[in-house]
Image (cartoon, coloured by chain):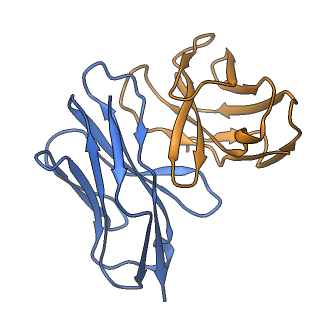
Chain colours: A orange, B blue
Amino acid sequence: DVKVTQSSRYLVKRTGEKVFLECVQDMDHENMFWYRQDPGLGLRLIYFSYDVKMKEKGDIPEGYSVSREKKERFSLILESASTNQTSMYLCASSGGRGKTDTQYFGPGTRLTVL
Amino acid sequence: AQSVTQLDSQVPVFEEAPVELRCNYSSSVSVYLFWYVQYPNQGLQLLLKYLSGSTLVESINGFEAEFNKSQTSFHLRKPSVHISDTAEYFCAVSRISGNTGKLIFGQGTTLQVKP
């Protein structure tokens, strides 16, 4: 079974803090993705990565950065958290580069920024 | 660019009744189509997908979806729902030419199955 784990299910941070969200997959997948999920907006892609040390912007990258130092780990960084970044964050992974493989999702991290 | 519209944000239905969750997409290029399901307090998981071949695709738990190219739709149906089908359902597309593995998701439809 593919497993995608996220470091926290719930997180509360203050405005201006630097926030790290961690995602680990155990299936040697090449592709990894970070989404945010908001009611009525569905899932929106923040960043994705095809390989170690490689990243590409998604549809809403502003205010976020990512890091992929190892194949199995993809981190999302909020450099200076703001209240409009309160959301559910979902990580996903899939197999081959550029392939239409099934994306496997983690359980999500619900981030609240006060 | 691609976009996906799920026409209903919530669909309440009684147990054992049929249900249809509607999905329309807009794209200037050919696309692959997906339905994902999110059960309460869980991440998303793939329900079914259309890549090529027969336009009618089925899932293991009784859902089916039909790709209609002329109407740019991929509606999800089930003839008889169970309480356990209560979840949020997301339609998604991915371009075929120059595929990058990226998915574009719709807004989601919450299916509420009542006893």
Examine the rendered structure and indicate whether residue A25 appears above or below residue B107.
Answer: above
- Along the line of sight, the residue nearer the viewer: A3 or A7: A7
The image shows residue A91 at horizontal and vertical percentages of 61, 37
The image shows residue B63 at horizontal and vertical percentages of 32, 65
B16 sits to left or right of A106: left
- Along the line of sight, the residue nearer the viewer: A73 or B26: B26
Asked which quadrant contains residue A6, the reply is: top right
* Residue shown at the point (33%, 23%) measured from the top left: B99
The image shows residue A39 at horizontal and vertical percentages of 57, 54
The image shows residue A94 at horizontal and vertical percentages of 49, 31
* Residue shown at the point (46%, 28%) measured from the top left: A95
Asked which quadrant contains residue A114, the reply is: top right
Q: Residue furthest left?
A: B70
* Residue shown at the point (69%, 40%) measured from the top left: A5
* Residue shown at the point (63%, 10%) measured from the top left: A53
Quadrant (top left, top right, bottom left, bottom right) of the N terminus of chain B: top left
